[in-house]
Each structure stands twice: as C-alpha cells, then as structure tokens.
Amino acid sequence: MPKEDIQLILDTAVSFREVLERPIKKVPPLQGKTIANLFFESSTRTRLSFELAERRLSADVLGFQAAGSSVSKGETLKDTARNIEAMKIDMVVMRHAASGAPHYLSTVIESAVINAGDGGHEHPTQALLDMYTLREKFNKLQDLHICIVGDISHSRVARSNIYGLKTMGAKVSVCGPATLIPRDVERLGVDVYHHIDDVLPKVDALNILRIQLERDAGRLFPSIREYHNYYGITRQRLDKAGGEVVIMHPGPINRDVEISADVADGENSVILQQVLNGVAVRMAVLYLLGTRN
Ligand code: NCD
C-alpha cells in the first residue's frame, strides 16, 4: 500500500476517533450498506472491532463463523462466499487460516474484500492501528525505531507492520530466537537482533508478539520459561535499558510469557489505546471503501 493511502486512512481515522468520544457514537455514511463478516478463524478483538466499526457507520452487519456453518458440511470457500453475496451484500471482512484466502475471494466475488488476518501472511488493519497509535504518541512515524519482538515467523502482524512502517519511513528491527525469525527477513529492510538487551536502548517502541502455539511454535524453543528469561519484557529489563519505551502488543497477551503483567498494565503500555484506535481505523477503511464510486 502506497504512503499516500496509508496517510489518507490514518488522517480519516482521526475524525472517527473523535466520533468515539461523543455521547452518541454513531454516524450515517454507510446507511443502507450491508457488510458480511466472514470469520473462519478465532478472533475476539478484530471481530468485535470490525463489527463495532460497521455499526458506528450505520451499516447493516451480517455475522458468520465457520464453526456451525455449512463449511463443516463440505461447502467450499468460493461457494459459501458466492451464496452470501447472492443475498446482496456490499462488503466482506474476512479472516482465514490460509494465507491468500481474502485475495482469492476478491477474484471470485464482486464485493470489496477486507483482509482481517490471513494465516501467517498479513493483518493490514492491525498494522494501520499500530501506526495510528504510534503517530498519536510521537506525532510522526518518519525516523521512529520500532522493534518487533518474538514469534516473527508465524506473525501476520509482524509482516504488515514491517511493510507499513518501512513505507512510512520508520526504522524497523526484529528480535527473537533464530528459530522464530524467518530466514532472509533482512530482505524486508529490517535489522535482526537475537539479544533483547542489545536493541532495547535504541528503540522508541516495542511491538511484542505472542508465541503462536496453535501454529506449532512451541517446537522451536526449549521452554516457555526459558523464552521468558531471554525475551520476556520485564520492568527490570526496561529499567536497565534506561529511557522510555512505548509498549505495544496486538493481543491476546500471554502474561508473564512475552510480557510481564506489570509492564502490560504499566504507564508505558498503549495496549488498550491500540484497541480503541482499532475501531476508528477500521471505520476509516470501511468508510473509504464503502463510499467510493
Ligand atoms: C493477532 C492475530 O490474530 O493476528 N491478534 C489480533 O488480531 N489482534 C495476533 C495473535 O493472535 O497473536
């Protein structure tokens, strides 16, 4: 996504962020539009955030979860989607365990498709809300240094953040055990660290990732306790590095694994601001797509 588009989404989100502070948090631009949320993989934040964003723009919302649907009766993704589209919907928001599923869907249906996370590939609206939160905190993205920590290999959040932040002129590094960092990740223009204490003093913000045990990441390091000892972000570690570091996490957090509970709840943490900003950013994406001619 080009810089101008990211800029436009972030700027548009500022006015929706303001709407969220009003007593009546609802505006009319998507009145009469119907949006289907197709979630083929578990989600709490992203699903609720999209749904709230849709309702706050006055769209009609259709929910779908793979469990309990005809997917379990053998219906293909294409057929499921085309049937839902036959009911005259305007946009689809989709999460799927297969990388590329939303892209594929966009080639078989007419409606606009928004990627809400596809396998280990991308999670664009998460990166947008992360960038929004950073911009709110620092008033810029250019020249900030962000380190993404943890399970980079399995993380769609990492990939989308790298692409987005690099496009906006930030410096990005990744840190984690070699087994959780994709080979050749430097080609994406990031620096690689294996010792968190080496990179901590240099960064403006940390984006801390969960170990994706459901994608088998547990095989790639000796134990959770050892991971915490080497890579867990603790108060002590932050104090040793000196300076203030903004703490981000896309959620769900595993307390005392990748992040200690006091850091997650501490004053440098913007984790809940990320969640709030997510609604505004998704409103901006839906609005821009839903009102174009
Ligand atoms: C992430 C996801 O599902 O990609 N969560 C989110 O959307 N906020 C990260 C994760 O599952 O660890």
Image (cartoon, rainbow, N blue to C red):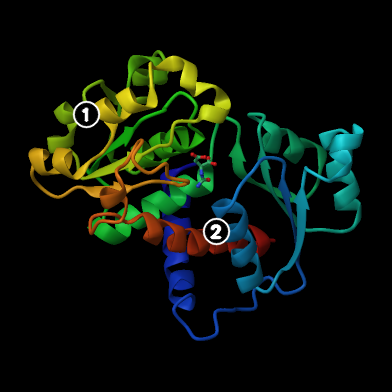
Residue at the spot of label 1: 196
Up/down of 80 relative to 19, above or below: above
Q: Is residue 173 visible?
A: no
Q: Is 221 above or below relative to 50?
A: above
Along the line of sight, which residue is nearer the eye, 15 or 1? 15
- Quarter holding the C terminus is bottom right
Q: Nearer the viewer, residue 92 or 2?
A: 92
Q: Is residue 49 left or right of residue 266?
A: right
Is residue 259 found left or right of 280 in the rendered image? left
Image point (45%, 63%), residue name: 276
Q: What's the residue at 56%, 26% (across, down)?
A: 215
Query: Is residue 133 shown to the viewer in this render?
Result: yes
Mark earlier in primary sequence (2, 1): 1
Q: Secondary structure at mark 2?
A: helix
Amino acid type, mark 1: Ile
Estimate the x, y position of residue 61 in percent, counting from the top left.
74, 64
Q: Is residue 51 left or right of residue 13?
A: right
- Whether residue 272 is situated above or below residue 108 in the rendered picture: below
Element under disc 1: helix
Q: Front-most of 17 and 47? A: 47
Q: Position of residue 15 (x, y in %)?
A: 45, 72
Measured from the top left, where is residue 103 in percent x and y? Answer: 68, 35
How would you rate the neighbour count of disc 2 (Cα within 10 Å): few for under 14, some for 14-19, many for 20 or more? Answer: many
Asked whether mark 1 and ligand 1 are closer than 8 Å, the reply comes as no
Residue marked by disc 2: 282
